[in-house]
Image (cartoon, helix red, strand yellow):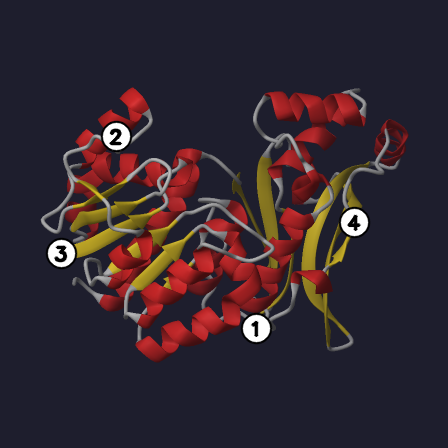
Amino acid sequence: MWKIGCVGFGNVGQGLARILDKKRDALKERYGFEYEITFIADPVKGSLFNPKGIDLASVLAAIDRTGSLKEHPDSTDKDTISLISGNYADIITEATYTDLRTGEPGVGNIRTALENGIHVVSTNKGPVSLALPELMDLADQRGVSYFFEGVVMSGTPTMNLAREALAGCDITGAMGILNGTTNYILTRMEEGMAYGEALEKAQDLGYAEADPTGDVEGWDAAVKVQVLAKVLMGEPIRVEDVDRTGITGITSEDIKAAAGRGARIKLIAEVGRENGKLVAKVAPKEIPLTHPLAGIMDATNAITLVTDHLGEVTIVGPGAGRVETGQALLADLLSVHRVHGGS
């Protein structure tokens, strides 16, 4: 029986909780995966603690009713670090907000868990961007796992694809559409919208933030390239090392000109080697209509991995969403279960 602590209970944490509540019996039957949620730590919505297991149905009912956990019977005043370090869980799910300047609170949460011999599954890009080598080394030293499938393409399995299904292959490069917001904007521009109008539409639908800088200037995709460089190519780099150009300079005329050449403009994130040197970049690029990535429209993500045994392998799927990203956490929980066995 795995004891799980949930750190962060926003959209992603709630998405995972809904999956776990719905599929408890199926997970036991298919994978032998049994669990109890011993704590939920969220400084805004409220934190819960029950070493015998928290009833997820009551938690989700409270969230749906009031948006808060502060009146739940298992409410606690224990802070997040105390809950992580209290040996109340074998695994924590870390789904707090991303801060690409400091990596906090994610780095501190994950470091504390690993130091205490607790497995971590996370969707938080900040720690991966700023402290991945340190955290992976710490996990190795403590004999635990740190998995972060959801940081690149939400629940669409990129890291798991490389680690499991493509085991034995050398991955020599990768290129993909890793930011759904920019792909949505470019799709609308191809239909005739100007950049500003397409951005406003993306904001209305919740694809883009009020400040869309992280998406449209390529920072989000650059962090994902940074992750791919480390995980797929074995070479840690800083996000500042990624040659980055966003889509803010793309015009309707550029879109039409590309179409006239039998291509579409996509914001492409890529990593590979040229003359033995790692090259990592994000930039708008004309993709021939014959290439699988050219057909990826709206907010969908896709990535093409270049391998020695299979050539190019392309996987397509959603790059965001509450349940979709919750699925990434679930996949990583099951990976921990496979690697380390029942607790």
Q: Distance from label 1 to label 3 (Cα)? A: 34 Å
Q: Tell me, for residue 135, which label it has, or none.
A: none
Which of marks 2 and 1 precedes in the sequence?
A: 2
Q: Tell me, for residue 234, which label it has, or none.
A: 1
Which of marks 3 and 1 precedes in the sequence?
A: 3
Q: Is residue 137 above or below residue 53?
A: below
Q: Nearer the viewer, residue 223 or 110?
A: 110
Image coordinates for residue 278, horizontal then vertical, percent: 71, 71
Image coordinates for residue 104, horizontal then vertical, percent: 49, 55
Identity, as a three-letter code, of the amino acid under mark 1 = Gly
* In this rendering, the label closer to the viewer, 4 or 2: 2
Residue with the mark numbered 2: 60
* Rendering quarter of residue 230: bottom right
Q: Tell me, for residue 245, which label it has, or none.
A: 4
- Mark 1 and mark 4 in contact? Answer it, CB < 8 Å: no
Image coordinates for residue 212, horizontal then vertical, percent: 67, 36
Q: Is residue 176 visible?
A: no
- Mark 1 and mark 2 in contact? Answer it, CB < 8 Å: no
Which of marks 3 and 2 precedes in the sequence?
A: 3
Residue with the mark numbered 3: 1
* Residue count near mark 4 (Cα–Cα under 10 Å), binned few <14, some 14–19, many ≥20: some
